[in-house]
Image (cartoon, coloured by chain):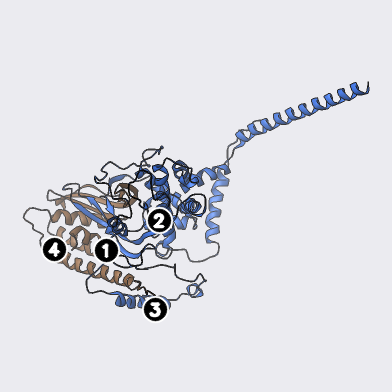
């Protein structure tokens, strides 16, 4: 249901960091090269409005971004907010899942579990809102 | 008094800053933690973010604390901070349809696809001060959290729903109540008022960006004026939704969509019967207006949607400003930025000794001129009186 980036960006930073560390333990320190960041910056929110189906700039969003190479493979991490650890961990996992031969396929097991947890959290959050659904009586 | 060149005041300014800090803390109360402000003053945080045009809840909490609750000052602090950051990229365009809704209501139809959900709202409460909040304890907080679990149980559905709903506006389009969407999507780069000063007539994207960062009170006033009598707007709420929007950017290597988290946001569509029968339309239809804010800002989103509707109608009929002040796009957009307006107003507190000295000289000359004229008139009267008596 959710993409990997959707699951990871909605998961606790400690869990995502632990996943990244699980990857890094398999490489020497010099296997990781930071290309840029982690740095705090902005992305410009593009909203698609419903009157003319046009796009407008609705404001900026504070993000943290990291770009790196893991064993020569590019990795990109970006997260809303000021969280360099989170952004770096996302970049490590992004690179790990792109490495030739898929040496980190085992990550998918944990990511799937996080996806299930996220789905449950979203369902619970909606359920609370759904309890306020209006039942109209017609006279 | 002649021309006075002045300098100094540094010590006074530094001491004034210390006095501000003293006034904030003189009561000896426990300093507010940012996380408390973010969680418990979410409307203040949301307002600072949408008027500061920067989604950053913790920084907004800091701004609210530093500004001692002054909403314009808090948004000013955020917007100033924004200017120190670089912009990496735009997000991928996102529609409100992708929102995980926590609240969704319509005043147009009782039965909307998916139903109406009141969500977290104080709209239906009697406006009485709640003394229980004044004396909250750990036990009362626990009770609230336990009550939430009961709500979860009450609203849990078997279909795994998470709050995605179709738009009421789409239903109205299907029923041909409002104009269809353009057959070709507008793929032009949206105007960016942070990079290019707005000029008139302006594109729709500039209008919406400007309104989205406008002052809540100002938008409310303009929209209210148009509804109450200085205009001809008759809005009806098609849909108001509050919830969480997933944000995506393009991966710099592959271009695939990458989710980077979600933001809380409010979106609103207004239909208006004002000028619903536009001259160039073959079929009479309602007009639609759009509003959007960061956080939970319903009054601002509704006001923005009303103004969007009013301005669209005024532009379509070439009647800018003739249906009241709120129908004048240049007037509305150039005066609705709270930071610009407050900055200009506040600048009158700064020394104006030289310009005021010039004003004084003009005043002196005017007085001399008036005195000379009076003297001349008196002399004329005296002369005529002497001539008459002779």
First in sequence: mark 2 vs mark 3: 3
Callout 3 secondary element: helix
Callout 4 secondary element: helix
First in sequence: mark 2 vs mark 1: 1
Quick one: quadrant of the C terminus of chain B? top right
Label 1 – label 4 distance at C-alpha: 26 Å
Are marks 3 and 1 in one subunit?
Answer: yes
**Residue in the picture at 44% in, 70% down:** B124
Q: Colour of chain B?
A: blue
In the picture, the disc for residue B301 is 2
Marks 2 and 3 close (CB-CB < 8 Å):
no
**Crowding near the residue tagged with mark 3, few <14, some 14–19, many ≥20 C-alpha atoms within 10 Å:** few
Nearer to us in this view, B351 or A119? A119
**Which of label 3 and label 1 is nearer to you?**
1
Chain assigned brown? A
Q: Please say whether residue B78 is visible from this viewpoint.
A: no
Are marks 2 and 4 in one subunit?
Answer: no
**Which of label 1 and label 4 is nearer to you?**
1
Label 3 – label 1 distance at C-alpha: 29 Å
Q: Position of residue B346 (x, y in %)?
A: 54, 45
Label 2 – label 4 distance at C-alpha: 41 Å
Label 4 – label 3 distance at C-alpha: 38 Å
Which residue is labeled 3 in the image? B143
Callout 2 secondary element: helix
**Which of label 2 and label 3 is nearer to you?**
2
Q: Please say whether residue A70 is visible from this viewpoint.
A: yes
């Amino acid at each position: 249901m959710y993409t990997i980036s959707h699951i990871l960006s909605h998961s606790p930073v400690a869990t995502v960091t632990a996943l990244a560390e699980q990857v890094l333990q398999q490489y020497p320190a010099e296997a990781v090269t930071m290309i840029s960041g982690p740095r705090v910056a902005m992305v410009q929110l593009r909203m698609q409005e419903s009157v003319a189906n046009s796009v407008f700039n609705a404001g900026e969003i504070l993000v943290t971004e990291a770009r790196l190479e893991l064993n020569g493979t590019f990795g990109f991490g970006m997260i809303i907010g000021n969280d360099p650890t989170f952004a770096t961990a996302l970049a490590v996992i992004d690179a790990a899942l792109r490495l030739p031969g898929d040496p980190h396929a085992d990550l998918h097991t944990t990511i799937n579990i996080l996806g299930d947890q996220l789905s449950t959290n979203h369902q619970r959050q909606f359920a609370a809102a759904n309890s306020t659904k209006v039942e109209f009586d017609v006279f | 008094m002649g021309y006075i060149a002045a300098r100094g005041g540094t010590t006074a300014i530094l001491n004034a800053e210390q006095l501000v800090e003293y006034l904030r803390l003189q009561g000896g109360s426990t300093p507010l933690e940012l996380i408390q402000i973010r969680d418990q003053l979410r409307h203040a945080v949301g307002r600072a973010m949408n008027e500061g045009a920067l989604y950053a809840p913790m920084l907004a909490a800091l701004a609210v604390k530093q500004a001692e609750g002054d909403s314009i000052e808090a948004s000013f602090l955020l917007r100033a901070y924004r200017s120190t950051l670089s912009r990496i990229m735009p997000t991928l365009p996102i529609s409100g349809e992708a929102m995980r809704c926590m609240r969704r209501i319509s005043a147009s139809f009782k039965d909307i696809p998916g139903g109406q959900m009141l969500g977290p709202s104080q709209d239906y409460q009697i406006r009485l001060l709640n003394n229980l909040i004044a004396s909250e304890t750990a036990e009362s907080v626990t009770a609230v959290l336990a009550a939430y679990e009961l709500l979860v149980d009450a609203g849990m559905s078997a279909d795994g729903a998470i709050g995605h709903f179709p738009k009421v506006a789409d239903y109205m389009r299907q029923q041909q109540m409002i104009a269809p969407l353009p057959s070709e999507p507008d793929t032009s780069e949206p105007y960016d008022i942070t990079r290019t000063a707005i000029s008139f007539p302006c594109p729709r994207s500039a209008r919406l960006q400007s309104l989205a960062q406008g002052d809540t009170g100002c938008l409310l006033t303009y929209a209210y004026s148009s509804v109450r009598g200085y205009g001809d707007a008759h809005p009806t709420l098609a849909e108001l939704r509050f919830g969480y929007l997933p944000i995506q950017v393009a991966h710099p290597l592959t271009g695939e969509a990458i989710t980077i988290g979600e933001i809380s946001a409010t979106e609103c569509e207004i239909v208006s019967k004002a000028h619903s029968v536009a001259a160039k339309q073959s079929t009479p239809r309602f007009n639609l207006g759009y509003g959007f804010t960061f956080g939970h800002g319903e009054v601002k989103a509704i006001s923005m949607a009303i103004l969007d509707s009013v301005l669209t109608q005024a532009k379509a009929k070439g009647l800018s400003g003739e249906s009241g002040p709120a129908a004048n796009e240049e007037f509305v957009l150039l005066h609705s930025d709270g930071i610009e307006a407050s900055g200009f107003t506040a600048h009158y507190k700064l020394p104006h000794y030289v310009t005021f000295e010039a004003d004084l000289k003009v005043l002196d000359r005017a007085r001399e001129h008036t005195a000379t004229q009076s003297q001349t008139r008196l002399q004329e009267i005296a002369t005529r009186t002497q001539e008459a008596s002779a």
